[in-house]
Image (cartoon, grey):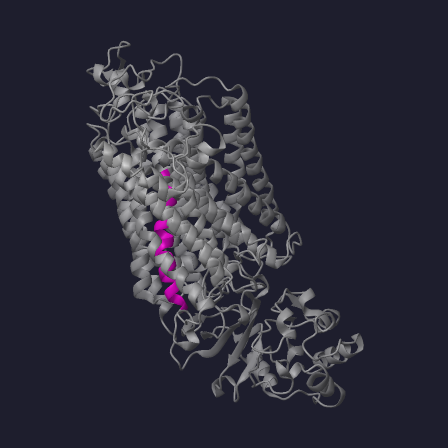
Amino acid sequence: MSTAKHRRRLAVPALAVGAGLLLAACSGNENGQNSLTPRGPAARDIDTLFRLVAGVAAVIGIAVLVATVVVAVRYRQRRDRPDAPRQVHGNTPLEIGWTVVPALILAVLAVPTVRTIFTLAEEPPASERLDVVAVGKQWWWEFQYPRQPRFGIDRRIVTSTELHIPAGVPVNVRMISDNVIHSFWVPELNGKKDVMPGRRNRLTIEADRPGTYLGQCAEYCGLAHADMRFRVIASRPDAFRAWAAGQQRGPNRPWRGEVQQLTAQKYQCVNCHVFDDSSKVALAPNLTHLATRTTFAGGTYALRRADLVRWILDAPSMVPMQSKDCRKPPPATCVGMPSYVRNTPKGQPVMTRRDAEVIADYLLAGR
Amino acid sequence: MTTVQETLPAPRTVGLLLRRPRATTGLWSWLTTVDHKKIGILYGGTALVFFVIAGVEGLLIRLQLAGPNGTVLTAAQYNTMFTMHGTTMVFLVGMPLAVAFGNYFIPLMIGARDVAFPRLNMFGYWVFLLGGLFLYSSFFLGGAPDGGWFGYTPLTSTPLNQGFLPGRGPDFWAVGLIMLGIGSVTSAINFIVTILNLRAPGMTLMRMPLFVWMMLVVAFLTAFAMPPVTAALLMIIFDRNFGTLFFNAAAGGDPLLYQHLFWLFGHPEVYILILPGMGIVSEILPVFSRKPLFGYAVVVFSGIAIGFLGWGVWAHHMFATGLGPVAVSAFGLATMLIAVPTGVKIFNWLGTVWGGSLRLQTPMLFALGFIAMFTLGGLSGVTHSIVPADTQQTDTYYVVAHFHYVLFGGLVFAIFGGLYYWWPKVFGRMLDERLGKLNFWLMLIGFNLTFFPMHILGLQGMPRRTYRYAEGMGWDDLNLLVTLGSFVIAASVATFLVNVALSTRRGAAAGPDPWDGRTLEWSTSSPPPEYNFAAIPRVGARDDFWHRKYTEDAQGRLVPLPAGGADAATATAGSPPGSGHAVGDGHGDGHGIHMPSPSYFPLVMALGLPILGYAAVFKNPWLAIPGLVVLLYGMYAWAIEPATAED
């Protein structure tokens, strides 16, 4: 009996340590999207708080698990014991105890919780922060940089899928949506914030060091919600300025000649896309500096020529799109990129592979 | 008097067009019965069929996610699967299974012969069945629901031609849920009136079995939670079809309004689902520990407290929507608070088992499993009340893990415990103990394999409701494990079905009281006669039936009473019909007890609802006419048909 008791006394701390190791092991996943490996102040505040609460919860949880097993084994019906247990109907001090003690534990946990809530809600001062606007679309992200000469941004920059930020600088992300609800989430930099039509939500993100941090739309937004990914690319402040300068230049290969004829007249890509002005907002991603991005198609594909050609020809075969209605006249809304080889949009021809290659080569050449 | 009846020959029958059904066996008896026990079996059987369907949907989800970039389902199919898995499990499995147990056992446990409104009871079942069939008919009629079980606006509320969600899924979903809500509210009101008015003499509120208490709380929650969601669903239907702009931000509407209305239903709904499970476990633990429930009053009041607090925490589903730090702090603290009465229950259950003489039979194993698994779900719930942490966890697999620990580790374990516990009472035959234990262990292992790794996946950034994930995210191995676990759960459920099949053929006869039970349902035969008790029992104590069998010595130890030593007034309860003295009405009906008569009209009236539903989905006013005719005819005939047939 005493050894059993001894064993039990050891079991709880042993299992608590086990739980801690488990959390540590989970932190080992360096996938760029792991909330357990915070890479910025906000995510770190959250992680510290979570580890505290998870630790307390793990100890209580393991204690209850162990108690359940121990009680079940110890008090099981046995032939060598009389089958007439004492009829205990309750124990008021004990019951008051296990009402008050959890309440006290929670009261203690409430203090850092509320403090962190208010810390995270603080807006960084306008003089220190970079402002960006994240626009949720079905199913991709548009990022707009309003004019901020302090960061070398002299005219608006409109880009998509990849959000460039300077490391060590708080970034004030304002969020808008003109369609459904999305949620902006970069786990290693902060928790998520919903992007709601008609509401002005905001979130501060800051990366300690240069690096790439993965993000994902976290609110179900329809068919291709899973493919609505993005990435935050943090770089040193001078590298960020260089990137911003590059984005503000026009395309270094003019949008003229055959490619203009194909995209403006033949296939009417310009109904939704912009090719030669990175400050313009359009229905679909601004393609002026597509070649400076590493991914496309909602961040689902690396930017490679073969995939880009395939995308231009038949995007719905790579990411599901609601493009059947593209053939109908308005008000039918075409959600997503249509296919140019099946169900081509109204009045437009089936695209040849050569035409797609011309467009792709233009997009990939323009820096 | 006599002449009047002859000159005006039975005006009721003339107006009805349908004769009073007479069948007591066979299909027609099941279609027209008003017996709470038969209705309970119908609820349970139907819900178990939906449980298997929703389980298959879950397995398809898991096959799709077994590896990165899965191709088992298309994105559209996947979105339909998670929408229907959730909707089915909540509205067509969880709620009706609780209603099944409530229907069958509330009257038996409080010493009543039926529920207060037997025909309304049957109506509730038909609405549930037809509502379920209506929802599933969408697969063949223009698109199954694909907006999520929560159906957030404006995704679901935007008119079809704007293309946010193709197909008629949201229409079917909203109309179907309104129908199911009608069924739930009727059964809730029925339970409330039954419990408050039909208790046997001496069955005071504080002598009621815990399960009855919890069902009373659940019934109040249901009656008050359904109206806000019904309003929200009607607003969706109007936005989508009739040009209103409740949720259209561009026109001054507010999508967030929907979330408030939905979760004002949705959070009490969580307790609507889990409190019956807590009630079932509170019945099983004392019986198999041979000890009374530890701190009965505290368990009752903590259940009531959970019911009340459940109304003040809805916004913890909305911590990422930008409510502002003051609001989220308030809702976070309220959410923490609800952990206190929940913890009290867990400790009281352990106190019940502590010092007992435990029979580790299948119902008890499931009840103990419930305590352990539900506790883990409750604790991960506490981490959600830590608002900043929740902004990382919400909409990830961590939440999927959390609520499956609550609803599967909690509710489903309790339901299976209840099935094994009460099966002998309902069908008169035992379920096999060895298969039962296999059932339990497979479920415990499969459940943890499936849902524990999801905590880790969610913390490592895997979002919910995504039909595929990329390679190289480090999620592959855990997802494969999860998928394997889900098939272990499937094997466990299959074991149960085999057990049921074998029990039906060659299960051992149960006898009236196979577990040495404590509550009144064990005092009558298995299965109970139509009238439940030959004589309405007179209740002298909590766990009255137990006190007819046992007493305590000076040290509080259990002492069996000699057979026949029980109170003479209650000893006749389980005796064959005719021998006891029936309390109340004395109509000659074979057994001397007059029960409510079967009726067609609950079914007729319920049949009108899906017709009206199709009229709403397809915006077809011509369909509304037959729907209204059937509905109003059923309503009229029901109203003028007497509850009991003239002999």
Which residues make up the magenta segment?
B255-276
Residue B319 visible somewhere in the drawing: no
x%, y% of residue A241? 55, 82
What kind of secondary structure does the magenta stretch mostly adopt? helix
x%, y% of residue B539? 22, 24
Q: Identify the residue at horizontal 49%, vertical 88% (top origin).
A: A149
Name the foreground residue: B565 vs B641: B641
Residue A243 visible somewhere in the drawing: yes
Horizontal side of B605 relative to B76 (left or right) equals left
Quadrant containing the N terminus of chain B is top left
Q: Identify the residue at horizontal 40%, vertical 12% (top origin).
A: A79
User: Height in image: B423 above or below B255?
Assistant: above
User: Height in image: A246 above or below B207?
Assistant: below
Q: How many labels does the image show?
A: 0
Q: Identify the residue at horizontal 67%, vertical 76% (top origin).
A: A345
x%, y% of residue B151? 46, 59
